[in-house]
Image (cartoon, rainbow, N blue to C red):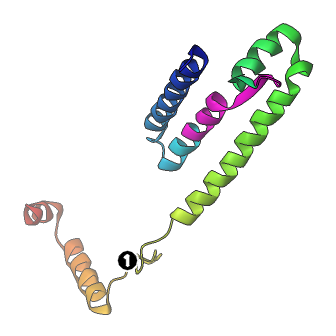
Amino acid sequence: MDSYQLAWTLYVIGGIGSGLAAWLLFRRWSKAWGRVCMVSLWVLLLTPYAIDAETMTMAPAIFILVMDGIAEGFETVKAVAVLLLGLWLVTLIVLLLLQLLLLRRKPGATARSDGADGLSEEELEARATLLEDRTLLDDKNFLRAER
């Protein structure tokens, strides 16, 4: 393994680790946001772009976008920006479709607005009776009854 392959291997390992760290950081909001951040970071960090088309020498597209954009202006890196933006949008669409396909409700679990949560008529009557009895007790008796 030459130094070029070793550099790419280490860079990919670091990029995957960064994506997983982003997922761990942002999954507190929701799993979906964690996945979006993870995949977005992977697209930005792991998309290669050819420096030399004849020898297929590759470099991370984000580095080419930033460094050549600073040195030579945006017109020279417009193709890299379009590539990154297009790949990011396609990835987000695929992620959205996967989340919609994988986000299935459990069989028999229906969301009801009346708070019944799939209870039978007998269970609903028992719940109503208990709730009525609870309102008749004062706060002290209710707290004692819970203990």
Viewer-side residue, 137 vs 53: 53
Viewer-side residue, 37 vs 48: 48
Viewer-side residue, 46 vs 10: 10
At horizontal 53% and vertical 20% (from top left) the residue drawn is 6
At horizontal 61% and vertical 52% (from top left) the residue drawn is 95
Count of number-bearing discs: 1
At horizontal 28% and vertical 82% (from top left) the residue drawn is 128
- In percent of width and height, residue 5 lies at 58, 22
Q: Is residue 56 left or right of residue 39?
A: right
Residue carrying label 1: 117
Numbered range of the magenta stretch: 38-55
Q: In this view, does 144 lie above or below 21?
A: below
Q: Is residue 48 left or right of residue 78?
A: left
At horizontal 55% and vertical 23% (from top left) the residue drawn is 11
Q: Is residue 138 above or below residue 113?
A: above
User: Quarter of the image containing the C terminus?
Assistant: bottom left
Q: Magenta stretch: residue 41 in it?
A: yes
Q: Is residue 63 left or right of residue 1?
A: right
Q: What residue type is labelled 1?
A: Asp
- In percent of width and height, residue 49 lies at 75, 27
Q: Is residue 110 left or right of residue 93?
A: left
- In percent of width and height, residue 60 lies at 68, 24
Q: How crowded is the residue under tag 1: few (<14 C-alpha within 10 Å), some, or many (20+)?
A: few
The image quarter in which residue 46 lies: top right
In the orientation shown, which residue stands out farthest toward the top? 71
Q: In this view, does 53 lie above or below 121?
A: above
Q: Magenta stretch: residue 145 in it?
A: no
Viewer-side residue, 102 vs 6: 6
In the orientation shown, which residue stands out farthest toward the bottom? 121
Q: In this view, does 50 lie above or below 98?
A: above
**SS state under label 1:** loop
In the orientation shown, which residue stands out farthest toward the right? 75
